[in-house]
Amino acid sequence: MANKKENYRYNIDNIDSKNANFNIIYGERSNGKSYQAKHKKGVVKYLKTGKRFMLVRRWKDEITTEKVEGYFSDVNIQELTNGKYNNITSYRKRLFLAKYDPEKNKKTLGEKIGYVIALSQEQNYAGVSYLDVEDIIFEEFMSRSEYIGIHESDKLINLYLTVDRKRGTTRVWLLGNTISRVCPYLQDWDLTTDIREMKQGEIRVKDMDTNTQDDNGNEIFVKLAIEHCIETGKTSFAIGRHKDMQNKGSWQVDPQPHLPKSKKEYNSLYKIMFYYKTFKFLAEYMVDPKTMEKVWFVSPFTKDIKNNILVFSDVIKTSKYWQRDIYNPNIKNDKIKNLLSTFRESMIFYASDLCGTDFKQVIDFEIRKWYIIVKGGNINGYIKK
């Protein structure tokens, strides 16, 4: 594992040396990962080999000529081409080296170096030939706002198949900031455990099963590499609740309620599990023996789920222990139903801000809220919000 260095800048060569078909690179903002990809796997590679590349963004409005030119503005085209060109622009979804004359406000297109595609429109290009492409650069695969849909990763694979045409030579570079661990690519490709475990500076390589065999009957695997970029050690001058993500590459989290006392001061009364989008959480109903105050405590869970614990999940099973709706469980025990009805926002506390953020992002139900009616200093009841 690499060590943190003062003013460290990211170098794509480390993960590149793993020679993986799919490369996931994530970390803090402005650490150089985008520059390394478009410089080394895009422009410089074309100038050296003539092999073109494809730039992929999620939405159509992200691939306008203005935004494409802005994306490549930090690449010194004039120096790389010995003054022949000074700009990269797009025309009809193709990328060109260009010469811009500021005095005449005129741009002259030169060599075609690649393509630019909106992933949301990938089906429009299924019949196009891209046999001149060896690298696909997908920017911001971890979204700050929304994804195309729950099957977005399938659209990227379809685009990959369109470009590669069973050659097995195309390499994909997925670049992202540490926005959220709840990401369709991580769930669909079974990478959530790796992402939870990985430390900054670590690179992991996985053989992904294709469920196909070669002519000799041997299983065919695709190599995937993941890198959690090391912290650069240089601030982005960000402030606010997400400053650790911006400045240090920590996962973006929102403040969550924590237990007012140490967990050791509570007695556990009942336990249930939540299992959504491959994330597992243990929820404990606990009581403070001194005040008799009852709370729910939610913490990450990494072990196998036992067969005799009540589980709420997006996974469907015919077991009576596996349920969908915590507020309307399909069980006959009224005591447990009444207990589950106490799972309310004002009573829930989390092991960490990251745990609470993950939990709220993966569950497919809305946590119910209550207003507390207080009369004469005593709690008399609740009103549903």
Image (spheres, rainbow, N blue to C red):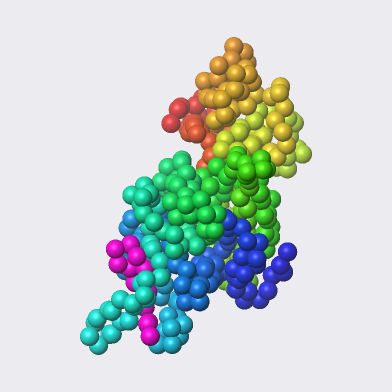
Q: Which residues are magenta?
A: 84-95
**In this rendering, is residue 303 above or below 22?**
above
* Quarter the C terminus occupies: top left
Position of residue 12 measured from the top left corner of the image (x, y, whole percent): 59, 68
Q: Identify which residue is drawn at 45% across, 85% down.
A: 79
Determine whether 2 is above or below 318 in the image: below
User: Residue 176 at x, y = what percent?
Assistant: 52, 58
Q: 199 or 224, which is in the foreground?
A: 224
Q: Position of residue 220 (x, y in %)?
A: 63, 46
Residue at 71 percent of width and 67 percent of height: 2
Q: Position of residue 21 (x, y in %)?
A: 58, 56
- Which residue sits furthest front? 215
The answer to whether residue 292 is visible is: no
Asked whether 10 or 305 is in front, the reply is: 10
Q: Where is 68 relative to 130, above or below? A: below
Q: Residue at x 51, y 51 (%)?
A: 166
State whether residue 10 is above or below residue 186.
below
Q: Is residue 232 magenta?
A: no
Going by the picture, which residue comes out furthest to the right? 264
Q: Along the line of sight, which residue is nearer the eye, 226 or 328?
A: 226
Is residue 88 located in the magenta-colored stretch of the structure? yes
Any part of residue 371 in sight: yes
Total marks shown come to 0
Quadrant assignment, res 338: top right
Name the quadrant of the N terminus: bottom right
Q: Residue at x 32, y 81 (%)?
A: 99
**Which residue is situated farthest in the left direction here?**
104
Is residue 134 found left or right of 320 in the rendered image?
left
